[in-house]
Image (spheres, rainbow, N blue to C red):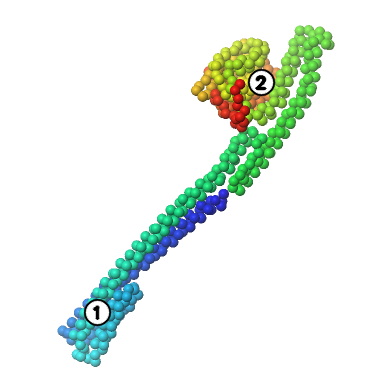
């Protein structure tokens, strides 16, 4: 994955550095052109001014015949030599260099004229003629200097245009290549990321049966190996827990069977007839023995429920017959508790896991019966809403305390003992309900205000989707 990022970053970095170098080169050329142009222009102006000054001095001497003026003319000629040397460093065109040569030749003749033995013998007419020629040479120098600046400006514009074209071509090639590299990197890491996401979701649901294999960049494959190690560790812990539950349940069932057998013998009068008080105590022992046996069986079934909670065996069925079957199974308990039922079930056709939905109804109904007082009422309502349907089960007990609601769906958490109960539950009924509701893509919540006791509201889709084996769906 790091190599892929490097393949994207390196061309971009090279392009940026190349653009920076070209811009730097253009900026340096521009700076050099400006500096040389300004200096050449200033030197040309100084050349015109100095020639004009020498010409004025010459004409003044013709009038005044002052020997000091000759010295001023000589100094002016020396300054002309310095200006000409500076222009030679800035001008490169053959025409400009030829004009500088003519200026130098005129200065040489000027020095010959000024070298006369006496000022009276100086040929000022020839000197003025030389100065006129120097003015023409200076004009050609200025003209050629300007032409040189214009030519170099044209070259700079051409260089800038070429640089722009090169950068445009590089960008035209680099942008698609970068997009292709980004797309390839996204596709190469997208699949392993989906595999990792699916693996984490399965681990979160407690499904440890599917091996975790991540194919892709080395970093993500290493992360997949870590997740596989975690899955194996969680699977080992789950198996150890299930073995512990099976062993403990088996150890509990043996003495419990003896207790139930002895209780039945007492109830049958095998050791003598029991009076009413003794028979009542024996009945209590028998009922609680039955409760303990049911709890042990629930413990034995809990691991199987958890291992199958995420797998849906989807079929199509009607809700009313299923609710009727659940109520018939609980009929004796309802009669013994003298509980009144308020049942309102819409005739819904569902596509779901029938056995898991039956367990949801049985656990919620059993929980409502357990916490309803004798002679109380249990409300069981189901109604459809577009693509979803809602199940409400409420009792007339004391409800669920606020401090217990955060943990009421945790496995093995048991709240307060039910009224009149002698044995606490295992605390797995509501946890199983939550797992099966989640497996169907539904929600369950505790509702306040509508009924006096605990009110569980379950919302499920009418058409559930099999999570792992969609081909199992069939018509009931």
Name the spot of residue 214 as percent of width and height, x first: 61, 43
Residue holding disc 1: 134
As displayed, is residue 392 above or below residue 410? Answer: above
Of 212 and 257, the residue lying toward us: 212
Q: Looking at the image, which residue sits at the far bottom?
A: 117
Count neighbours of disc 2 (C-alpha within 10 A) and say few if under 14, some if 14 to 19, many if 20 or more. Answer: few
- Please name the residue shown 57% across and 14% down the image: 343
Question: In the figure, is residue 238 to the left or right of 108?
Answer: right
Residue 246: image quadrant is: top right
- Please name the residue shown 63% across and 20% down the image: 362
- Please name the residue shown 75% across and 15% down the image: 286
Name the spot of residue 124 as percent of width and height, x first: 19, 85
Residue 68: image quadrant is: bottom left
Depth check, mark 1 against mark 2: the one in front is: 1
Name the spot of residue 335 as percent of width and height, x first: 65, 11
Of 336 and 443, the residue lying toward us: 443
């Amino acid at each position: 994955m790091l190599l892929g990022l490097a393949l994207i970053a390196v061309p971009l970095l090279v392009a940026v550095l190349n653009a920076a170098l070209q811009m730097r080169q253009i900026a340096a050329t521009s700076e050099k052109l400006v500096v040389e142009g300004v200096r050449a222009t200033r030197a040309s102006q100084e050349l015109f001014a100095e020639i004009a000054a020498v010409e004025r001095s010459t004409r003044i001497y013709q009038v005044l015949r002052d020997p000091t003026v000759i010295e001023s003319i000589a100094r002016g000629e020396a300054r002309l030599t310095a200006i000409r040397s500076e222009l030679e460093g800035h001008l490169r065109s053959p025409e400009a260099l030829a004009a500088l040569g003519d200026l130098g030749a005129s200065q040489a003749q000027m020095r010959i004229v000024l070298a006369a033995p006496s000022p009276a013998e100086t040929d000022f007419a020839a000197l003025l003629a030389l100065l006129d020629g120097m003015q023409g040479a200076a004009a050609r120098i200025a003209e050629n200097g300007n032409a040189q600046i214009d030519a170099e400006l044209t070259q700079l514009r051409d260089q800038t245009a070429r640089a722009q074209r090169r950068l445009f071509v590089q960008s035209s090639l680099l942008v698609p290549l970068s997009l292709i590299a980004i797309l390839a990197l996204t596709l190469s890491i997208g699949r392993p990321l989906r595999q990792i996401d699916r693996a984490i979701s399965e681990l979160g649901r407690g499904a440890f049966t599917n091996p975790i294999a991540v194919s892709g960049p080395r970093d993500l494959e290493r992360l997949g190996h870590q997740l596989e190690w975690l899955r194996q560790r969680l699977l080992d812990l789950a198996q150890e827990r299930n073995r512990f539950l099976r062993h403990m349940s088996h150890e509990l069932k043996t003495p419990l069977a003896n207790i139930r057998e002895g209780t039945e013998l007492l109830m049958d009068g095998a050791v003598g007839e029991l009076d009413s008080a003794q028979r009542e105590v024996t009945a209590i022992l028998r009922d609680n023995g039955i409760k303990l046996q049911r709890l042990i069986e629930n413990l034995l079934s809990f691991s199987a429920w958890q291992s199958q909670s995420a797998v849906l065996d989807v079929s199509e069925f009607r809700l009313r017959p299923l609710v009727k079957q659940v109520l018939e199974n609980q009929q004796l308990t309802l009669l013994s508790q003298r509980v009144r039922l308020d049942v309102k079930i819409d005739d819904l056709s569902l596509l779901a896991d029938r056995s898991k939905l039956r367990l949801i109804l049985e656990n919620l109904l059993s929980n409502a019966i357990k916490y309803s007082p004798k002679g109380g009422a249990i409300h069981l309502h189901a109604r459809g809403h577009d693509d979803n349907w809602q199940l409400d089960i409420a009792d007339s007990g004391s409800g669920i305390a606020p401090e217990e609601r955060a943990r009421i769906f945790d496995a093995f958490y048991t709240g307060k003992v039910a009224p009149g109960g002698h044995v606490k539950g295992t605390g797995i009924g509501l946890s199983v309900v939550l797992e099966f509701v989640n497996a169907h893509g539904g929600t369950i919540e505790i509702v306040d205000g509508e009924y006096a006791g605990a009110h569980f509201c379950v919302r499920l889709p009418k058409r559930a989707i099999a999570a792992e084996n969609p081909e199992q769906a069939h018509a009931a």
